[in-house]
C-alpha cells in the first residue's frame, strides 16, 4: 500500500516556507502502515501540477495533494486534477450555496472569485473543511485516489484526520502495521550511540524485521526502532525485545522515550524527590533557564536563575570570589562551582546548576570556542565538569544546556562519571 | 535556467525530519535567478533514486541532490547517480588517501565501510567537504549536471556556497535576475501588516512586476518583495520604489531588512548610544536573555539578567516591594515596573527590561493565559505596557520576548505609543 505526497506552491520552491506538511503526513501515513514512496513539491503551474499528479500515480495508488485549493488565480490544484484525468471542472451548486451562507454569516462581502472554491473536477466529491472556507477534493483517477487539501497546516491536519486517513486505511484493507519506538539519549554523540548498537544494527539489517535509525539534533541523539508486522501485537512484541537490548547497551545514556524531553525528565526527577533547581548562566545568557521553564508545571521545581553575562556580575550577583576569577578566570571549573554554589544559596534551591564558557565567535581568556564548564552545587556536593563542545555559537550554547541538564540528571541517578 | 532539488532519505519520507535543505537551496538558487521547478524526496532505494534523477533531468539542467553520500550501506546516492548514467562506481585513490589521513589525524580507527565515501561514478569529480568527511559529487549526465551534497545542513550549505552555486551561475550565463527585498516588522500582526499594504499589493498584482508575500513567524511579520528583470539594476530600481512605499505605510513597525534580527537591531541602537540593558524575567524563564545574548558581540551591551520564576524571588532578587506584589499581584504593570527598576539597579545597566505574565497552561491570579506586562526602566523613565497575547505556552513566551524588545526599541526611537 503506497502513497505519494504532492505539495503545490511557489512559496515552497523559493524557500519562503518549509514543507512541514510533508513531514506530518509522512508520520501519519507511515504509522498506519502506508508506505510513502516519494514527496514532491511543484509550483503554481497547472501543467506541472497535472504532470506531477500523473507521475505520482505511476508509483502509488494514493496521492495526497496539499495547497493550491484556495480562491485566487494562483490556486490551480482543482484545475490540474481535472486536466490529469482529462475531465472538466464543474461548479458544485451545493458547495457554492454553502460558501455564500458562510460568507454571509461572517458578514463578509467577498469577490466573486472566492466561489472558484466550489469548482470540482467531474466525478470528484468535496471533503468538508470545518476550519476554513476551501473544501477539499476526493477524486478517483488514473486507477487510484487523489485527496486535495489546503496548505494551511491546521485546516489540512483536521481534514486529513477526519476524512482522508480513515478512507485510505479502509481502501488499504488490512495493511501491515508499522510500530515505532523512540529511545532518547543525552551525553552521547551520534557516533557513540551507533558504536554501542553496531552489532544489534547489523543483526537487524540481516534479519530485515526491524529498522534502526539514528537521529541527532540539538546535542541529543534519538534511536528510532521501526517494525512492520501483520498485527500491532506482533510488531510490539518484536520491538520490545529490540528496545530492551538497545537500552541495555546504551545504559544511563538513555533518558527517556518517545516525546520525552530532557528538561521534563530532569524536572520530574527533582519533583519526585521534592527538590528544586536554580541556574547561573554566562555564555548561554538565559537559555538554560528558558529550557528548564519550557515544560508545563515547571514552577513547582524551577526556582529561577541569574544570568551573569558581564564578568563582573559573577562577583556582584553570584558572589564568585574575586580571587577565583583572577586566578582561574571566568571560564574555569572553579568559577562554575562558585556560580553554582552562589545561585543555590541566593535562590534557596536544592541544586544550583551553572554554565560558563566560550560560545564564540572569538576565544576568551585564551580559551578556545567550545570550552565550557558545568558547575553543580547540592546538599552535599560541589563539582564541575569540563567540556569541549563543537559547532558555532548557537550550537555551543545549545550543547552546553543539554550537557548541564545531563550532569544534573546523572548526579540525581548517582551515575555521574568521576572524570 | 532551471534546477531541481532531490533529497534522499527514509527519515524525510516518514517525517522524522523536515526537509529544511530544500527551503534553503530554493532561496539560494532563486535569488540568483535560477528557477527551481520541482523538489522531490525519495527514500534510500537505489532504483527509486536513479529514477528520480532521470525524471529531474527531463525538466531541468541542474539537479542538486542532498543526502545519501555518507559511509553506511543506506547511503546510495553515489550508486544511483552511476546507475542513472549507466556507468560504474570507481574508488578514487586520492580521496581514499585523504580520508585515511583525516581519520588518522582524528585518531579514529574507522570501519572499512567508511571508505565507500571515496567511490565516485566514472567521470564524476569530488566536491571538497571541509566540515565533514563525505566528499560531494559533481557529475555531468543526461545533458546536465548533478551535484550531490551531504544531508547535514551546515556541511551542505558550505559546499553549496563555495563550490556549487558559483558553478551553476557560471553555467547559466546571464539569466533573468530575481531580486528580493525583505522588510522586517515587529509589534504588528500579519493582518495589520497586510491591511497597511492592501492597496499596494492590489496594484502590484495588477501590474504583475513585483510579488508581495507576507511571512509570519515567531511573533514577527516579514514582507517579501520579489522582482524579476533582465538585469539586476532594473530589478533593484523597481524594487526600491516599492520598498520605499511599503516602509512609509508600515512606519515604525519596520525594524530592519533582510537577515536582521530584532535583537541585533535593539543591541545596535544601544551600542550606538553607549548604553546597556539587563533583563528581569518571570514567565519566559530566561528566554529574553537568551535571545538578547544570541548575536555575536552581545557582551558589549547585554549585561545579564535575573530570572525570578518563583514569585518570592521577585522580592528577594529584584527588590519588588512586598506590598506591590500583594496589592497588584505578580502579574501586573506595577510589578513589571518594579522588576525593571530592580534589575537596572542590580546589573548597573542603562535600561532594565522586564517581563511578567501568564504563559499557561492555566490562569494565574485569576488572569488568563496570554496576559503579559512589559516593564522598562531607564535614566528618566519607568513604564509598563499590558499585552494580551494569543497562542499556547511556547508562543506566548516567544511573543512576550518580541514584545519586550520592541518596547525598548520604540522607546529608544522616541516612538513608543502612549497607550
Image (cartoon, coloured by chain):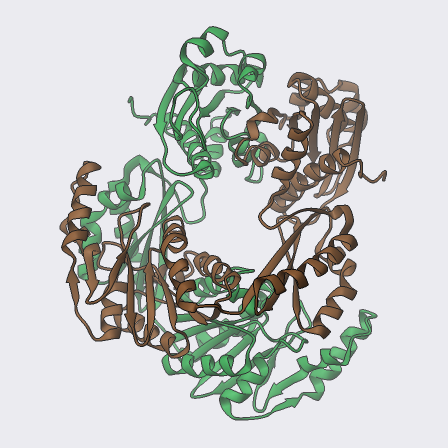
Chain colours: A green, B brown
Q: Could you tell me residue A117's position as x and y percent?
A: 67, 79
Tell which of A414 and A292 is nearer to you. A292
Residue drawn 39% across and 55% down? Answer: B160
Q: Determine whether B328 is above or below A334 in the image.
A: below
**Residue B265 sits in which quadrant?**
top right
**Residue A109 sits in which quadrant?**
bottom right
User: In the image, is A22 to the left or to the right of A348?
Assistant: left
Q: Is residue A174 visible?
A: no
Q: Determine whether A139 is above or below B179 in the image.
A: below
Quadrant location of the C terminus of chain A in the rendered image: top left
Tell which of A350 and A198 is nearer to you. A198
User: In the image, is B172 to the left or to the right of B371?
Assistant: left
Residue drawn 55% across and 93% down? Answer: A87
User: In the image, is B301 to the left or to the right of A344?
Assistant: right
Q: Could you tell me residue A82's position as x and y percent?
A: 55, 88
**Residue B231 sits in which quadrant?**
bottom right
Quadrant location of the N terminus of chain A in the rendered image: bottom left
Q: Could you tell me residue A120's position as x and y percent?
A: 61, 86
Q: In the displayed orientation, state which residue is furthest to the bottom.
A: A87
Tell which of B361 and B408 is nearer to you. B408
Amino acid at each position: 500500500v503506497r502513497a505519494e505526497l504532492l505539495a503545490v506552491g511557489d512559496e515552497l520552491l523559493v524557500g519562503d516556507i518549509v514543507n512541514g506538511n510533508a513531514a506530518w503526513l509522512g508520520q501519519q501515513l507511515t504509522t498506519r502502515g502506508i508506505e510513502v514512496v516519494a514527496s514532491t513539491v511543484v509550483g503554481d503551474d497547472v501543467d506541472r501540477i497535472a504532470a506531477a499528479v500523473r507521475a505520482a500515480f505511476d508509483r502509488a495508488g494514493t496521492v495526497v495533494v496539499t495547497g493550491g485549493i484556495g480562491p485566487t488565480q494562483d490556486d490551480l490544484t482543482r484545475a490540474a486534477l481535472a486536466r490529469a484525468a482529462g475531465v472538466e471542472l464543474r461548479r458544485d451548486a451545493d458547495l457554492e450555496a454553502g460558501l455564500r451562507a458562510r460568507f454571509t454569516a461572517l458578514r463578509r462581502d467577498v469577490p466573486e472569485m472566492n466561489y472558484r472554491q466550489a469548482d470540482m473536477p467531474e466525478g470528484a466529491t468535496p471533503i468538508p473543511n470545518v476550519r476554513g472556507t476551501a473544501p477539499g477534493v476526493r477524486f478517483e483517477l488514473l486507477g487510484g485516489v487523489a485527496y486535495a487539501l489546503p496548505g494551511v497546516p491546521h485546516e489540512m491536519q483536521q481534514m486529513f484526520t477526519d476524512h482522508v486517513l480513515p478512507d485510505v486505511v479502509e481502501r488499504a484493507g488490512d495493511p501491515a502495521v508499522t510500530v515505532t519506538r523512540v529511545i532518547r539519549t543525552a551525553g552521547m554523540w551520534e557516533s557513540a550511540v551507533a558504536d554501542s548498537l553496531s552489532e544489534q544494527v547489523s543483526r537487524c539489517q540481516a534479519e530485515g524485521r526491524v529498522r534502526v535509525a539514528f537521529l541527532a539534533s540539538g546535542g541529543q541523539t534519538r534511536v528510532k526502532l521501526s517494525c512492520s508486522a501483520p498485527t500491532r501485537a506482533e510488531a510490539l512484541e518484536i520491538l520490545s525485545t529490540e528496545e530492551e537490548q538497545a537500552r541495555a547497551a546504551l545504559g544511563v545514556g538513555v533518558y527517556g522515550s518517545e516525546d520525552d524531553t530532557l528538561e521534563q525528565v530532569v524536572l520530574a526527577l527533582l519533583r519526585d524527590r521534592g527538590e528544586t533547581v536554580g541556574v547561573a548562566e554566562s555564555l548561554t545568557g538565559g537559555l538554560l533557564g528558558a529550557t528548564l521553564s519550557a515544560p508545563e508545571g515547571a514552577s513547582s521545581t524551577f526556582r529561577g536563575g541569574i544570568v551573569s553575562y558581564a564578568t563582573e556580575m559573577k562577583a556582584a550577583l553570584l558572589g564568585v570570589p574575586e580571587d577565583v576569577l583572577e586566578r582561574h578566570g571566568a571560564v574555569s571549573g572553579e568559577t562554575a562551582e562558585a556560580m553554582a554554589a552562589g545561585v543555590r544559596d541566593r535562590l534557596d534551591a536544592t541544586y544550583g546548576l551553572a554554565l560558563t564558557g566560550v560560545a564564540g565567535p572569538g576565544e576568551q581568556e585564551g580559551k578556545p570556542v567550545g570550552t565550557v564548564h558545568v558547575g553543580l552545587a547540592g546538599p552535599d556536593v560541589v563539582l564541575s565538569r569540563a567540556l569541549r563542545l563543537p559547532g558555532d555559537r548557537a550550537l555551543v550554547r545549545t550543547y552546553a544546556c543539554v550537557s548541564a541538564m545531563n550532569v544534573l540528571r546523572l548526579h540525581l541517578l548517582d551515575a555521574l562519571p568521576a572524570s
